[in-house]
């Protein structure tokens, strides 16, 4: 049996004269360091195991780590964690992120004092399971309570609080309606976004703000892009039907599965028949109108969905550029699976020291942004972003666009793409760019608000297409 490590406390800052000693429970600066590497003895097939793993990830997000990275760190520290356990932790963590505003409001109402990081995260995970938006909790409620207390008892950062965890969750079961009625009067708890985010959506989209926020709180679909070099929509839908998988066409190359599955269970995925890509993101390659033989630059290319789609539609000479060499490696993996070829360059799109001077016929500029339009896929973004991020990222994106414009051949086209909902990063950026560079603006969709339904289902993206005068 693994021994629990001794909790280490951060040393208080020195001061003159020396401060009197305080009990650690009353000293704000004496908080236990989160023990992310603790090896639990819980069984991997138990809900308690998944809860403590998900809570660990949530606590790291609250400390500034994005959720995929936090989950990867958790899995990396657990010996021989099974795919089933990873899937359960991921599901719980994503649920908790989508309902964090409500859960934290409930905790503040019921807990006698603000809980420590991992305790609060564990309660948030449990409450998210007990308040499923569709009113069908994935587990029996008393099972959730029992397993959350078991999880608390199994970790040194939470063991002392197991009584409080039990009391809070049992109180919620007794007083559910009154507690929910009380917290849902708070906009942050009702919508599960920071107040500044709610205000920004209201300002940008006064007629649509409720739908935008609500869509961002739903689980995203699994949408596939068929590889036009290897199959057609009709052929692939028939292949899915043979495999007993229900699916719907929601775009020229887009197929939405009725039920998400692991990628390697998708018929034809490993053979390159399809890729996973949002239906809205699939508009980029057709809008560029790439013809055979053209020189094309996909700036900020990782993970490579748009690069591959361009090559599926035309025999072009494509350069995939990205500042992150590790993420660029994913572009290479996707190209290899699809049996496509492109030149990969690890370099920053706001500089030109990597460029050979030969101009491109088409440039795809999917620039850095707040990613506010894809929160249903990345629910942690809303809690990690700050109000001033849009200005900072818009400034960087403007520099990238101006730099790329110099690399475009006369008569060439540049497609500006962003997955933001904020006009500062999208329409205002496009208008300012056109003025600065005397760019001719062509027809493009503009802002796509996130939408879900039978006829369409896509993230929030913005498209602006420009042509360079000869």
Image (cartoon, grey):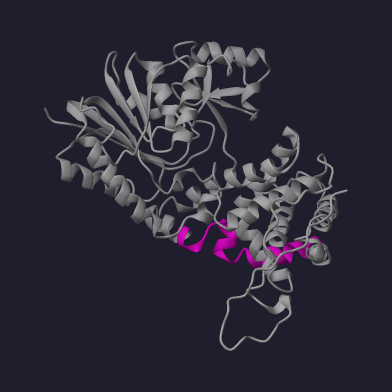
- Does the magenta run of residues contain 90? no
Q: Which residue is drawn at the image coordinates 48% and 40% (left, top)? A: 451
Camera-side residue of 430 and 326:
326
- Does the magenta run of residues contain 183? yes
Direction from residue 82 to residue 433 in the image, left or right: left
Camera-side residue of 16 and 80:
16
Q: Which residue is drawn at the image coordinates 23% and 41% (left, top)? A: 402
Residue at the outermost right position: 1
Q: Which residue is drawn at the image coordinates 73% and 69% (left, top)? A: 110
Q: Is residue 423 visible?
A: no
Residue 214 location, x and y as percent?
54, 49
Direction from residue 304 to residue 347 in the image, left or right: left
Camera-side residue of 26 and 22:
22
Picture mark count? 0
Q: Note whether 398 is above or below 289 in the view shown.
A: below
Residue at the outermost left position: 470
**SS majority, magenta:** helix
Q: Is residue 162 visible?
A: yes
Quarter of the image containing the C terminus? top left
Q: Note whether 415 is above or below 373 in the view shown.
A: above
Residue 84 location, x and y as percent?
75, 34
Q: Which residue is drawn at the image coordinates 41% and 52% (left, top)? A: 207
Residue 360 location, x and y as percent?
24, 25
Q: Which portion, as a residue range, is magenta? A: 169-197
Direction from residue 40 to residue 469 in the image, left or right: left
Residue 53 location, x and y as percent?
72, 48
């Amino acid at each position: 049996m693994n021994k629990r490590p001794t909790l280490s406390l951060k040393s208080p800052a020195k001061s003159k004269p020396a401060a009197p000693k305080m009990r650690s429970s009353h000293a704000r600066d004496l908080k236990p360091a989160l023990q992310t590497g603790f090896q639990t003895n819980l069984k991997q097939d138990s809900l308690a195991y998944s809860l403590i793993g998900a809570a660990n990830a949530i606590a790291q997000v609250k400390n500034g780590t994005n959720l995929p990275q936090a989950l990867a760190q958790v899995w990396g520290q657990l010996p021989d964690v099974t795919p089933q356990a990873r899937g359960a932790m991921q599901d719980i963590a994503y649920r908790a992120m989508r309902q964090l505003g409500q859960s934290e409001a409930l905790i503040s109402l019921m807990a006698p004092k603000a809980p420590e990081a991992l305790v609060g995260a564990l309660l948030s995970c449990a409450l998210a399971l007990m308040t499923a938006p569709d009113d069908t909790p994935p587990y029996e409620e008393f099972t959730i309570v029992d397993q959350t207390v078991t999880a608390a008892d199994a970790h040194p950062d939470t063991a002392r609080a197991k009584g409080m965890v039990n009391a809070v969750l049992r109180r919620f079961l007794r007083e559910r309606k009154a507690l929910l009625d009380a917290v849902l009067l708070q906009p942050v708890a009702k919508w599960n976004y920071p107040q500044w985010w709610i205000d920004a959506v209201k300002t940008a989209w006064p007629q649509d703000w409720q739908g935008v926020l609500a869509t961002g709180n739903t689980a995203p679909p699994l949408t596939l892009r068929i590889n036009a070099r290897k199959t057609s929509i009709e052929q692939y839908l028939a292949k899915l039907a043979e495999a007993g998988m229900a699916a719907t066409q929601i775009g020229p190359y887009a197929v939405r599965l009725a039920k998400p599955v692991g990628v390697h269970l998708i018929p034809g995925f490993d053979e390159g028949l399809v890729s996973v890509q949002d239906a809205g993101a699939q508009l980029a390659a057709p809008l560029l109108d790439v013809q055979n033989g053209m020189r094309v630059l996909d700036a900020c290319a990782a993970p490579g969905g748009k690069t591959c789609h361009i090559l599926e539609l035309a025999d072009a000479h494509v350069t995939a550029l990205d500042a992150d060499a590790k993420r660029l490696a994913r572009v290479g993996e996707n190209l290899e699976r699809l049996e496509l070829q492109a030149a990969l360059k690890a370099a920053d799109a706001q500089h030109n020291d990597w460029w050979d001077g030969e101009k491109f016929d088409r440039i795809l500029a999917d620039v850095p942004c707040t990613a506010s339009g894809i929160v249903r896929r990345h629910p942690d973004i809303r809690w990690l972003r700050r109000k001033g991020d849009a200005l900072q990222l818009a400034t960087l994106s403007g520099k990238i666009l101006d730099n790329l414009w110099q690399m475009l051949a006369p008569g060439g086209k540049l497609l500006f793409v962003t997955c933001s909902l904020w006009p500062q990063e999208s329409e205002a950026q496009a208008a300012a760019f056109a003025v600065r560079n005397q760019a001719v603006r062509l027809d493009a969709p503009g802002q796509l608000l996130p939408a879900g339904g039978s006829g369409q289902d896509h993230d929030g993206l913005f498209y602006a297409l420009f042509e360079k005068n000869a």
